[in-house]
Amino acid sequence: MKKYVLLLPVTSQPRFIRRIKTLLNSGANVDVASYERDYFNLNKLPAGIGFFSLGRVENKKYIQRVKNFFVSLSGLKKFVRGADCIYSFSIDLLVLSFFVKTPQRYFEVGDLREISNPFLKGSFHYTYGKLLNKVDRIFVTSLGFKKYLAEKHHLNSDKITIIENKLSATDFDFDNRKEFKVVEDTEAFCVGIIGLLRYECVIDFLKAYKSSKATFKVKIFGDGPLRDRVLPFVDDKNIFFNGQFKYPDGLDNIYNQVDLSFVMYDSTDLNVRLALPNKLYESMYFATPLVVSTNTFLAEQVHKYQIGFSWPQNDMVKLVEKLDSDAYLTEHNNYKKSLDTIEKSDAISEY
């Protein structure tokens, strides 16, 4: 029986839990070493998983991570003893994995990272490329990620496997998926902001909405670094904050309350331009159109399937005006035809 030790930035991310369950279902033995954080802690690791804490960290406190790195190293070496493979899920944890002995190293790229400092950018890419070439297997969640990494770091594409963020067949029954809900009045229309609150687009949208006379509602489901900046907009009349939720259990209730999923992120970010987030597949399953940022791979997919529209991230005022119009309701209801034709393989993975 193969033994894996997964090095995680946080234990509650649904994608990480999916990977753990997949490995367990294959008959593998799985232990986890992870940082601990103060948000999105409702999702728990499967029972019986061995756990080692890499310490508590705050978002973007990178010096704190370096300190935890050295403090936890000795304990981690003991924890991973006997493991056949160390499977890392962030760049700093990939670096950490090279300080302990293991027959194999896997690395999963859920986010692409860029260094803006011109003095550090070159050395970062050089070091990152060396590490990627040394690992045995690389997993990515988007075709865009695979193409970028293979070209940027001269990787053999055969060692890169794509595991899209599609929904799990064990958790979602495609034959009983939600039907599209036709909306006839803007006052009954609801925009949902769902998931990790970390991109400035959310704040920009809420500012534009608050300054308008729009009659549609906004419901926020999630948590993250922007929580304290989001809460002042909440009035429990037009803007509602519901906090973090348990995945996947809470999704059905959430998507029953919203008509459009707001999935706009900062498209100047390389990661955002190439990523395919789980919101794409959730919208397919729950028959809920999306609005996404222009100039992204996600926008290409939304247009391909005709299940929503893209919008410039620097024009939230006009977006609010559009969503509050009768003309948009007609456009919105026309997405029903496309969402009704979504195939199981488009939204659901086989594991």
Image (tube, rainbow, N blue to C red):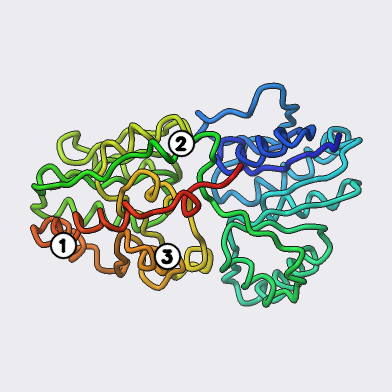
Q: Name the residue under label 3.
A: 301
The quadrant of the picture occupied by the C terminus is top right
Question: Does residue 73 appear to the left or right of 13 in the view shown?
Answer: right
The residue shown at (11%, 52%) is 214
Circle 2 or circle 1, nearest the eye: 2
Kind of residue at disc 2: Asp
Q: Provide residue 188's location: percent of width, then percent of height.
A: 13, 42
Residue at far top of view: 48
Say what secondary structure mark 2 lies in.
Answer: loop
* Disc 1: which residue: 322
Residue at 20% x, 58% y is: 334
> Closer to us: mark 3 or mark 1?
3
| Distance from the alpha carbon under mark 2 to that under mark 1 | 34 Å
Please tell me which residue lies in front, 197 or 117: 197
The residue type indicated by label 3 comes to Gln
- Crowding at dot 3, Cα within 10 Å, few <14 / some 14-19 / many 20+, comes out as some
User: Does 139 appear above or below 75?
Assistant: below
Q: Quadrant of the N terminus?
A: top right
Q: Distance between the residues labelled 3 and 1?
A: 22 Å
Q: Quadrant of residue 31?
A: top right
Q: Is residue 284 left or right of residue 210?
A: right
The residue located at (30%, 70%) in the rendering is 312
Q: What residue type is labelled 1?
A: Lys
Label whose residue precedes the other's in the sequence (2 or 1) = 2
Q: Eyeballing the image, is 348 above or below 240?
A: below
Which residue is more in the foreground, 236 or 326?
Answer: 326
The reply to whether the C-beta atoms of the residues labelled 3 and 2 are less than 8 Å apart is no
Which residue is labeled 2 in the image?
Answer: 173
Above/below status of 351 relative to 111: above
Q: In this view, does 287 lie to the left or right of 69?
A: left
Q: Residue at x 31, y 58 (%)?
A: 338
Q: Is mark 1 on a helix, strand or loop?
A: helix
